[in-house]
Amino acid sequence: NADTAMYKAKLSGKDNYVFYHDEMKEELRKKSEIEGILRQAFREDGFLLHYQPQVDVNTGEIASFEALLRLKDFNISPGVFIGVAEEIGLIVDIGRWVTKEVINQLVRWREQGYPLKTVSLNYSNRQLRDVDYIPFLNNLLVSNGLDPEYIEIEITESSLLEESLQTLEFLDRLKELGVKIALDDFGIGYSSINYLSYIPANKVKLDKSLSDKFLGVHNSSVIDSIIALAHGLELEITAEGIEEYNQFIRLKEAGCDYIQGYLFSRPVGVDEIEKVYGTNLIESLNNA
Ligand code: C2E
Ligand code: MG
Ligand code: MG
Ligand code: MG
């Protein structure tokens, strides 16, 4: 962040200022390069979605897929390009594209007879400024004859704090529409328990960093507490970023509802995801 860099430079003297100045210039150059890539990708059909299963801990069935955005021709991670898309506002158009794409894919999967439950998509804080998003979504659902409960919208816990009234209103309208709501990156923000109890969400997604920190031998009762907290608020809970079998076992013991992570599958393209469709991922894991 440029402000922090400036501040640090001030604290540490002139030489460093030059150093940070170059660093900032380099950062700006990269950013505008990514901006160009994103604008072109948006114009020229350069995005695609990957899907990652969320596995029901108790049955091993795939409960849903999360749609995750990728650039077709560039190996730049969303962790990098989503931030730029948010900054330049392009995330609004991209978000609509993602929504349309997910709904088209849902319709295709249903036509092919897959026993599909939900597909979730990510919705940034910045997309709240898309005031017509809800009617847009509603029109798509109606024109495709798709039941709203097939869609789950993931919003981050941090957006609850940043634009809280706006976010709450948005969530109420989503709920009214009948789509499901998940609170993403749960546990790394600072929402109060009281505030969480107002949120019309169905589910929270425990951030990877917390599982990594608390699913070891030490402190693992923290995970039990978080899961109890979620359930106490009548929220289901998905643990994200689970890579190891031991973590899965521990989460199962703790009563976690869903697991998403490389242990079961990476996010993959439609062709790949169709190969695992209908398979019991816990059984396949145990048989491997
Ligand atoms: P997220 O919504 O929290 O998504 C989960 C991220 O964790 C994904 O990163 C996924 O690939 C990664 N992940 C899943 N399992 C594992 C695992 O076992 N190990 C590790 N190391 N990582 C795992 P990805 O796809 O790079 O996306 C990063 C973030 O970018 C997402 O975090 C989400 O906030 C944002 N994002 C992605 N697609 C979209 C989109 O279509 N719209 C918006 N607004 N944001 C998006
Ligand atoms: Mg997500
Ligand atoms: Mg997350
Ligand atoms: Mg995230």
Image (spheres, rainbow, N blue to C red):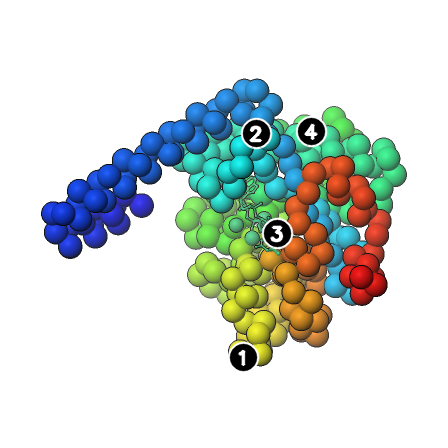
- Identify residue type, mark 2: Asp
Q: What residue would you read off at disc 4?
A: 140
Give residue 18's position: percent from left, percent from top.
17, 42
Mark 3 residue element:
strand
Check disc 2 and report the residue beneath it: 73
Residue 218 shows which numbered tag? 1
Comparing labels 2 and 1, the label whose residue is closer to the camera: 2
Is there a contact, CB below 8 Å, between mark 1 and mark 3? Answer: no
Quadrant position of residue 72: top right
Q: Secondary structure at mark 1?
A: loop
Residue that numbered label 3 is attached to: 182
Mark 1–mark 3 Cα distance, whole angstroms, equals 28 Å
> Are there few (<14), some (14-19), or many (20+) residues within 10 Å of tag 3?
many
Q: In the shown orientation, is residue 283 left or right of residue 232?
A: right
Q: Quadrant of residue 113?
A: top right
For marks 1 and 3 on the same chain, the one whose residue lies earlier in the sequence: 3
Confirm if mark 3 falls within 8 A of ligand 2: yes
Q: CA distance from mark 4 to mark 3?
A: 20 Å
